[in-house]
């Protein structure tokens, strides 16, 4: 039950989390091409969606829905010419921003809170791991298709 309360807290502060993440991405040298190649409104919308729909992603979405959504995101970023390392780091930064927020809120100060939050920690880690895996699959499939295209046009 505590995990659901934490997820709801995150959703209620999705705008703040998204703003902080956007600042982190803009000021990091690790994301310069991501920032330059992805339209700002698209990037902002995507960052907000993760936080605003966290409960949905964790509790109702199936593995195949995560697969479909993140393969598509990987394909899109590859086609936009975003280096994979920057794409990967941005997803990791999204997860890191979430943990920083929960720490700032003092959500794990009491042992009961800590153990209750472990359910959320585990679910979020699984979600981000799956998202990264499927995004990588999408990214690689685009690169492989581009390689086949080059071979057939030469």
Image: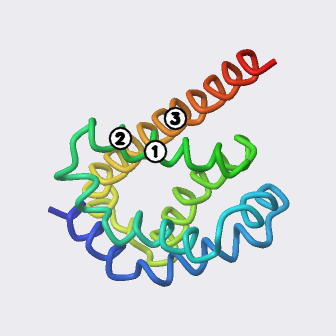
Image location of residue 17, percent across then percent down: 50, 76
Q: Quadrant of residue 142?
A: top right
Q: How is the image coloured?
A: rainbow
Kindly check if marks 3 and 2 are in contact, taking CB atoms under 8 A apart as contact: no
Label 3 and label 2: CA atoms lie apart by 9 Å
How crowded is the residue under tag 1: few (<14 C-alpha within 10 Å), some, or many (20+)?
Answer: some
Give residue 72's mark: 1
Give the residue drawn at x 55%, y 43%: 74
User: 70 or 91, which is in the foreground?
Assistant: 70
Residue 108 in the image: x percent, y percent? 39, 65
| Left or right, 148 with reference to 99 | right
Task: Give the quadrant of the N terminus.
Answer: bottom left
Mark 1 / mark 3, whichever is N-terminal: 1
In the figure, residue 126 lies in which quadrant? top left
The correct choice, above or below, for 2 with respect to 87 in the image is below
Extreme-front residue of the structure: 153
The x and y percentages for residue 130 are 41, 37
Q: Which residue is mark 3?
A: 138
Q: Residue furthest right?
A: 29
Do the residues bearing badges 1 and 3 touch, measured as CB atoms within 8 Å? Answer: yes
């Amino acid at each position: 039950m505590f995990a659901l309360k934490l997820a709801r807290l995150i959703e209620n502060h999705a705008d703040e989390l998204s703003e902080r993440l956007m600042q982190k991405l803009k000021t990091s040298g690790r994301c310069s091409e991501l920032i330059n190649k992805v339209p700002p409104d698209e990037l902002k919308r995507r960052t907000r969606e993760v936080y605003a729909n966290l409960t949905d992603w964790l509790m109702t979405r199936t593995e195949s829905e995560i697969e479909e959504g993140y393969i598509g995101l990987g394909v899109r970023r590859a086609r936009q010419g975003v280096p994979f390392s920057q794409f990967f780091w941005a997803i990791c930064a999204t997860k890191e921003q979430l943990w920083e927020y929960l720490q700032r809120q003092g959500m794990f100060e009491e042992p009961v809170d800590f153990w209750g939050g472990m359910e959320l920690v585990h679910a979020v880690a699984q979600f981000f791991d799956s998202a990264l895996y499927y995004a990588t699959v999408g990214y690689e499939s685009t690169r492989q298709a581009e390689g086949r295209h080059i071979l057939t046009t030469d």
